[in-house]
Every structure is written in C-alpha cells, then in structure tokens.
Amino acid sequence: MESSSRNQTKVIILGVGHANQLVTEVCQPAAYRAFFDRVQPDVIGIEREPSAFLRADFYEFTHEQQHIILPYAKKNHISVQPFDWNASMEEQQLAWGVADSEQLPFSRTHSAFKPFLSFSEPFTYENDFFFSEKQEAVDLINGMLKSKVGEADFPRRFFLYRTYMQAMRIKHIAQSAQGKTVLIVVGHLHKPDIEQILKTNEMIELVPPSTYGYPSAAEIESHFELKDASFIMAFNLLGIQSQFIVERNWLKNVLEKLPSEHLFEKRLYQIRFQQLLEDNKQTNVIREYKELAEEIGWKERFLFQTFGRMNDRIDSYYDPFGNVSIKARIYIELAREFAKQDEHSKVEEMKAHILDCTGWSLEEKLRLEGYWEEYVLSMQ
C-alpha cells in the first residue's frame, strides 16, 4: 500500500448510525464490508473503551462493531483498535444518578435508562452512507450541541469531552500506524468534532470516506452474509421496529435470501411479513403458526442468536423476546393473535405453555410476565 505524503498516516473517519445497518438497504452490513474492501485499511478503529474491548464487551446496539467490523477484520487479518472513552463510575453517579450507565435494568421500560431501540421516523439523513460529510449534517449536529442552562447541560459537556478523548486515542492509533491507512468507524455525532480536533495534526492526513465511493450493487451482493438476513428480519419483523417504518421491498428481497436449511425461522418471518406488510392478508395466521409450532422442538434457535451476545435474559436491545427459542416465539405470536380476537383463555394457555416448557429461570419468567401486557396483549 502506498504511504501518505511526508509519511503521514491516512485517516478516514466514517460516521455511522448505530444499528442503522439493520433498517436501511443503503447502509446494510454488506455495504460496509464492500466499502472496507475499497479502503483496504491497515487498522480499523472502533468506538469502544479499551478495557471493555479487551473483555470482548461491547455496546449492545453497535451492530457495526461486533457483527461487521470484528468478523471482517479477523477474516482479513486487519488490526482493530478501540478509541472510546467513558466517565468513571463516581462521575456517572454524580451526574446521572447511575453508577454504571451500561448496566441493564431488570426490565426495559420506556422510562428505563436503556429502553428498547427502534426508529420511529424515516430519518432519511442517516440513509445516506456518507451523510456525515455533508454540511447539513454538521449543522444538525451543532444544533443538537447548543449550550443549555444549569445541570441540564451535563450531557452536552460530557459528549464534547468524550469526543475530545476519542480524538486523542485516534491520534495515538495514527501515530502507531505511521504511514499506513487507518479507518475510524464512529457514531455520526462525533465525526465533525473529531476532525476539527485532528485536522491541524501534521502527521495525519484526513481523507473523506466518499473519496472511495459507494460500493456497486455487485460489490454489495458479493459481501452479503447469511447472518445478515437473520439479523435484519428479526430486527424489523419481530422487534419493536415492527410497529414503525420498515423498508418493505428490501425486506422482501432479504427474506428470499434466507435458505431452506433454516426453514422454521424463515417460515416464521414469512408469516409475520405477510401479516404486517402484505396488502392481501387472507392467510389464516393462527393456523399457520400452530402448524409451524407442531413441527419444531423447543431448542431450535434463531440464526442471529448464534452470532449474538448470549446471556440469561429473554430480551435483547431491540426486542422484549429477542433471546427466546423459535418455538417460544411462535407461541408469543399466537398469544398476540388470540389477544386481538379477545380469546383471553387461549392467551393465558399460550403463556402457561411457554412457562411450563421452556425451562426458564425464575428471573426469565418474571421478565416474561413484566413484558406480557404491553408487548403481547397490546402489540400488533
């Protein structure tokens, strides 16, 4: 690889919307892999604090980190370096009243520190792969970071200091990779300020990501992976996002790519897709769910779960039931359908069946009970 002028380190800062890869075709996971191929970086920097990175501990919602960058870097023998920064527990407690902002609440409610992730608006600005480079993005971000009065100003002050510390860690990454190419992948909001901080550093050459161009359709298609289909379908059809805007035509194409080897999972998505998005909804959803449930055992897992971070929770960051088995999920969907028809005894029958057959811990069962009314009885 050609080194930069005066032996500078070439630094490309790509702004992203965290988990945006799962809701928009333009920013889908395969587009990132194809873009990485174009850049050919020697190092990829990811937005994670170093000590957490060493523990393989990531933010739940940073799909681009653990599910795109890390596997890509491992496959292509590329160094990955963390550059994020976080306040100490004492500082977090003083400012937020929460000692560990990454600690998950027992149940994710609307008022919880970490509610379920979904995108309620079209947010077309993030659907542009190179959005962060545009002046409208800079103006939008600057508007969000206007000074506030009193204690309410802490999030802004913290964000700016965090971004400064990110820039300092990126500087050190660039120094250790002198004359090479470093790709930094960071949340949209951080990019403009990081570049402002680093632009006067003589050993760094900042290169706009758009210099490399958006990958062609053929490039993107060649980088599509089976796990992408599972993640995308689950996020849009099973998670909270299913109640909001989804890219129907793209989802239809993604669903077709899920092979017959994963028949049970694919069939669940097909039923849910038809139920939510098809104009002609003549199918008997309850009958189809029942038939599918009879064909599958309780231990069959979703494909995306084999790649995800497994723990003792039934929920995930975007779905109250994101870590249950396929069969348990079918019974949850059946309960929803019976609830729509006011067949309350059958709703309770479905819940009892799940609680009796899953082998869950008391904690898992309590979470199901806690989520049941809002996310089963009141959700489409």
Image: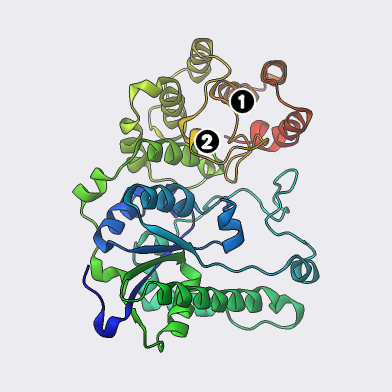
Image coordinates of residue 211 in percent, x first then y, are 25, 71
Q: Is 83 on the left or on the right of 316, as rendered?
A: left
Inter-mark Cα distance, 1 to 2 = 11 Å
Residue at horizontal 76 percent and vertical 78 percent from the top? 151
Q: Which residue is mark 1?
A: 332
Image coordinates of residue 95 in percent, x first then y, are 76, 71
Residue at horizontal 52 percent and vertical 40 percent from the top? 308
Residue 23 seen in the current view: no
Quarter residue 92 falls in? bottom right
The quadrant in which the N terminus is found is: bottom left
10 Å crowding of disc 2: few (<14), some (14-19), many (20+): many
The quadrant in which the C terminus is found is: top right
**Secondary structure at numbered mark 1:** helix
**Secondary structure at numbered mark 2:** helix
Q: Is 38 on the left or on the right of 149, as rendered?
A: left
Task: Say what amino acid the circle numbered 1 marks.
Answer: Ile
Task: Give the vertical position of 282 relative to 70 (above or below).
Answer: above
Residue at horizontal 39 percent and vertical 32 percent from the top? 278
Task: Say what amino acid the circle numbered 2 marks.
Answer: Leu
- Looking at the rendered structure, which numbered label has been put on residue 238? 2
Residue at horizontal 72 percent and vertical 53 percent from the top? 112
Nearer-the-camera pick, 89 or 63: 89
Image coordinates of residue 180 in percent, x first then y, are 31, 71
Quarter residue 79 falls in? bottom left
